[in-house]
Each structure stands twice: as C-alpha cells, then as structure tokens.
Image (cartoon, rainbow, N blue to C red):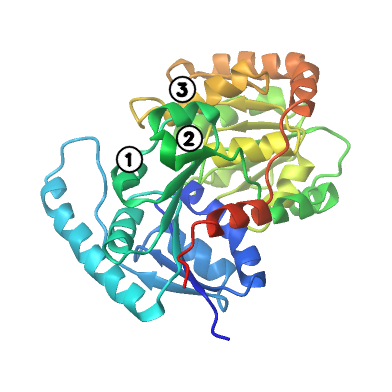
Amino acid sequence: MKKKTIILTGGGTAGHVSLNQAIIPTLLKEGFDVHYVGSKAGIEKELITTAFPNDVTYHEISSGKLRRYFSWQNFSDPFRVLAGVTQTMNIMRKVKPVIVFSKGGFVSVPVVMAAKALGIPVVNHESDVTPGLANKIALPFVSHIFTVFNETLQHLPAQKATCTGSIIRSELFTGTRQKGLSLCGFDGTRQVVLVMGGSQGSAIINDAVRQNLHTLLPQFDVIHLCGKGHADASLEGKAGYKQFEYVTDELANLLYASDFIISRAGSNSIFEFLALYKPMMLIPLSAAKSRGDQILNARLFKKQGFAVVLEEEQLTPNTFAETFNELLDRSSDILSAMEQATPPKTPEDMVALILQHQKRA
C-alpha cells in the first residue's frame, strides 16, 4: 500500500519550526511520507535537514519577506511569492499530499496558496495571542487553524478555528539534570540560571546578563545561550559561567539543569518552561522590534502567575537585577500556579487533530 504524503511548512524563526519538529516522529510512525517546503537559506532548512536527514524530504522554494516597514524589496517580493506558488504547485503535483500543515512565517504563504489552488486541505497553527501576518494572509486559503491561546479565537473566524492549548515535543522530557550540568562543567552544588535570547540571540539581554555576572556568580551558575556570533571570548573559562552560541539536542538537558530561566517570550519556549515547572523572567521583544506578540504572551503569563516580566524598554543592568530578585522572591508562588495549569497536549494528540482534515480518497 502506497504511503500517504503530508507537506509541512513554516520558517523564518525556530519558533515557526519547533512544532513541526515535534510532530514529525509521530507522522513517521503513522506511516506518512513527510515532505517539508521551506526557504533556501532560512533556519528551517538547517533545523529540519539536521534533525531528519533521511526521513524528511526538504524542498526549497522562493519566498518574499513580509515586512511592516517600507523597503524597496516590498515591490519585488510579491513576484518571489508568485514564483514560490508555482514551485510549490509543481512539488504538490509530484508528491500528491493529502494535507498541508503550516506553522506560519513568510515562507508558508506561497505554500498555502498553492495548496488551495490544487484543492488540498490546509491546517494552520498559531502560537501567539494575536495571529501573525503570514497566518492572517493565509486565512482565506486554510481549512482550519488551531491556536494555543483561547484569547486568539476572537481574532479568527469561529467556523474554522479551535484552541488546542500548547503542544510540547516529547524529546523535551528526555533531558536530565546531570547531563546538563556535565555539558557546562558545573558540579550541581548551586542553583542554575539559564538565559535565552531567542534563536537569533539578543544583544541587549546579553549585555544586561554580563553586566550582572558580578552579582549572579557568587550565588548561581549561569548558562547563557547568547546567539550565533555573540559569544564573548573574554568570558571563556570563567568559573560558574558557560556560554553557547546556539544549541539543538542539548537544550532539553540544559533546561533540566536549570532552576530559573530568563528569556524572550516566544510562545513555544514559554510553554516548554511551564511544562517543566521552571520559574521564568520574561523580557519580550519590544513593539518597536516586532508586532508585539511577545509582549502579549508575557503579560498573559504574568497575569496567570507563571512569570515576572521586564519590558525591553525598561531593561537596564539595574532593572535586570531588580526583576531577577523579584523572580527569586516569587518563585514559590510561581511554582504553585504552574502546578494548577492545564497539561500540554502531546504530539500524538496534535497529529490526530491535523489528520481529521486530510483529503479523503
């Protein structure tokens, strides 16, 4: 019996890929032939081809970038999107998917348009409180869209939107504290603070952390995921401080090794911290640097008692230290709130929901 084919898409940031990474093993177990349509140089290509070199077929297409600011490229990018639609239609005619699952990001736009043109069902997923621009554009072309937050449903057509809650990749729960400590050369006698600035890193968070090392290191060990090209050579070998530019498979172990987390407020990440019961200090991307989705994510988590929040506009070495002390003071209350949270769905749950919309023979 010939395998059914599914096409996954999504990219631009790690957050637009992580759910796809989570569900791929389940899709493979279900007997699907899994194909991924992404950009030629986006982070999605590196993540998917590294994690599934033999199990997933990766297809490169042309795609424009969806900008909220003026750029001369805004005039040429629609033609790249159209080229991407044509390329994707050719891919779909060849592999004949029964469904397309899109996680958003600009590369997903030509994919969902192509699927609609060929009569192939499309299921989207939105992780943030308000829909991203790519998912807004995709709405007329999709069969259904799943959300993480109930609050997102008010922005979407009721007949094609469902809140699933968070979905956590299974491998996240395979980490161990000892392996994480070993990766960093820590002996486990002190509590550990994990700092994450997102897949691209964050210069402003990096600076605030490094300017506070003199107050952090006497009491804590610090794991610092600083972003590619953002390592500080002068701090290599510093006792109690371990910096990584970027990690993939090691992340689960580093999360298990940590007692507190300081991070941006991407939806996928903060729900992972919640699932692992990690008190968190969130520093969301400012509205000047984003569409404000992380600000909404962070404020909702603060409202529910899962986090303390420091807005990027107020971030200084002093406010960083003050907010971290607030995290320490409130950690017991945060853990109590986390224990009352709704458990996340499994990748198997998510796959079952997606496949309800597949094209029937």
Q: Earlier in the sequence, mark 1 or mark 3?
A: 1
Numbered disc total = 3
Instruction: Specify the amino acid type for callout 3.
Output: Glu
Q: Earlier in the sequence, mark 2 or mark 1?
A: 2
Q: Residue at x 61, y 52 (%)?
A: 350
Alpha-carbon distance for marks 2 and 1? 12 Å
The quadrant of the rendering that contains the N terminus is bottom right
Judge left or right: residue 293 versus residue 336: left
Residue 51 at x, y percent in the picture? 58, 67
Along the viewing direction, whichever of 299 and 311 lies nearer the viewer: 299
Instruction: Specify the amino acid type for callout 1.
Output: Lys
Judged from the image, the secondary structure of the residue bearing numbered disc 1 is helix
**Looking at the image, do the residues carrying marks 1 and 3 touch, with CB atoms under 8 Å apart?**
no
Residue 99, by quadrant, is bottom left
Q: Residue at x 56, y 52 (%)?
A: 19
Alpha-carbon distance for marks 3 and 2? 18 Å
Residue designated by label 3:
312
Judge left or right: residue 285 versus residue 172: left
Judged from the image, the secondary structure of the residue bearing numbered disc 2 is loop
Residue designated by label 1:
136
Kindly give the residue lying farthest to the front in the view shown.
361
Residue 120, by quadrant, is bottom left
Residue 293 at x, y percent in the picture? 43, 30
**Looking at the image, do the residues carrying marks 2 and 1 touch, with CB atoms under 8 Å apart?**
no
Q: How many C-alpha atoms fall within 10 Å of the one at disc 1: few (<14), some, or many (≥20)?
A: some
Residue designated by label 2:
128
Closer mark to the observer between disc 2 and disc 1 = 1
Q: Residue at x 20, y 65 (%)?
A: 83
